[in-house]
Image (spheres, helix red, strand yellow):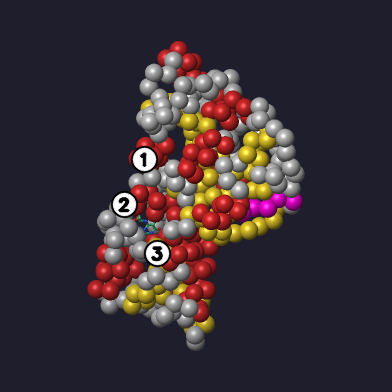
Amino acid sequence: MEPGFSETDRRLMAAAIRYAERHAGLTGTNPSVATLIVRFEGGVPLIVGRGVTAVGGRPHAETVALAEAGALARGACAYVTLEPCAHHGRTPPCAEALVAAGIARVVSAAADPDPRVDGRGHDILRAAGIEVAPGLLAREARETLSGYLARALRKRPEVTLKMALSADGMLGRRGQGRVAITGPVANAQTHLMRARSEAILVGIGTVLADDPALTCRLPGLEERSPMRIVVDPRLETPPTSRLGADARGVPTVLAALAGADPQRGRALREAGFEFLAAEPDENGRVALPELLDDLGARGISTLMVEGGAMLGGSFLKEDLVDRLVLVVAPGRIGEGGVPAPLDPQEAGHRFDLRRQLRYGDDLWLEYMRKDG
Ligand code: AOF
Ligand code: ZN
């Protein structure tokens, strides 16, 4: 137990962190934050207000929770997964709103690196005589805020590399692209991951071999399909591909190098594709760090990399992967297989294994970058 916190504090903060997941990926450039307003009646905690950052990013979690609590906020304790903001947006800062509502104690998890906040939120609370207890379950909270934190601190999206492997460590069969190896439960989880990402990226090799749709096809979540990005240096994506079929509905961006055939560009533009002028690396391929900088500047904070042994291998080699998801299916591919750029054993050396789940016959392994 962290010093200065009770077991009840810890349980309430854990609940707030779970609640913050609710709008993960739906709050734009804003993080999905949660607030619980809690009164202690004879030592028993009673939640009188709950809030999560609204879809689109405003109102903030504190505003929502304080509105629900009303007059019951006076003398209550607020549990916030991120330091309350200190800047004036469309509404006054959350720190001031907590003061005005008469909150007696604020327990927070992660600090906010936004230069407009960065400790000032806590300072406003302390100056008003509120007891401030920061840092409870900070690591767990940072995981729910990781996309926001990556963009705030590194000006780049958080990168999740997801790969499906056969039991013998193959990604697919040579010349055939992806062969369906994982089962329905793991596949549904993949679609859920897509829904929670702001953008999904594959290489042109995957587009040509698999003709993927890269949409979220879970019933009720079709609207949550993220932006699709293809690393396509020479504009080889066929306008008639499945990506082209709905490029007008789902933003689809081709990251191409200068000098790509303008004729192709025209046909693709007509099909609804958008373009991003990528920079070449020393091997004449699309430079991935610069591509990530570009996506960060466009407000993308979570990127899921889903395709291609080559592209996945490059992200790993260049140390650009923050989260790694390996789905290991029971079947073997054997002769003619395309080996994955790393296996679970190597992954264990480079990343921390955070979750290990069974989905049907598949093993789902989630890792985080070691220093994270
Ligand atoms: C909070 N509570 O629920 C969230 C916060 O564009 P704005 O004005 O909405 O401000 C965005 C910043 O607000 C963002 O960078 C982060 O510092 C903070 N997010 N703060 O008090 C919340 N989502
Ligand atoms: Zn705020």
Residue labelled with disc 2: 90
Instruction: Name which residue type carries label 1.
Output: Asp
Structural crowding at the residue carrying mark 2, measured as other residues with C-alpha within 10 Å and reported as few (<14), some (14–19) or many (≥20)? few
Q: Is residue 334 above or below residue 16?
A: above
Q: Specify the segment rendered in magenta.
A: 361-365
Q: Check if residue 277 falls in the magenta segment.
A: no
N-terminal of the pair, mark 1 or mark 2, is 2
Residue labelled with disc 3: 110
Please tell me which residue is depicted at 52% across the width and 32% down the height of the picture.
Answer: 203
Are the residues flagged by discs 1 and 2 in contact, CB closer than 8 Å? no
Image x and y of residue 294, in percent = 37, 37
State the SS at label 2: loop
Q: Is residue 348 above or below residue 13?
A: above
Foreground pick, 336 / 90? 336
Structural crowding at the residue carrying mark 1, measured as other residues with C-alpha within 10 Å and reported as few (<14), some (14–19) or many (≥20)? some
Q: Whole-Å distance between the Cαs marked 2 and 3?
A: 23 Å
Asked whether mark 2 and ligand 1 are closer than 8 Å, the reply comes as yes
Which quarter of the picture shows residue 184? top right
Q: Whole-Å distance between the Cαs marked 1 and 2?
A: 28 Å
Q: Whole-Å distance between the Cαs marked 3 and 1?
A: 24 Å
Image x and y of residue 147, in percent = 44, 51
Residue labelled with disc 1: 293
Mark count: 3
Can I make out residue 107 in this image? Answer: yes
Which residue of the protein is positioned furthest toward the left in this rendering?
127
N-terminal of the pair, mark 3 or mark 1, is 3
Please tell me which residue is depicted at 48% across the width and 54% down the height of the picture.
Answer: 369
Please tell me which residue is depicted at 66% across the width and 30% down the height of the picture.
Answer: 174
Can I make out residue 23 in this image? Answer: no
Q: Nearer the viewer, mark 2 or mark 3?
A: 3
Please tell me which residue is depicted at 50% across the width and 72% down the height of the picture.
Answer: 12
Relative to 343, is 3 on the left or the right? left
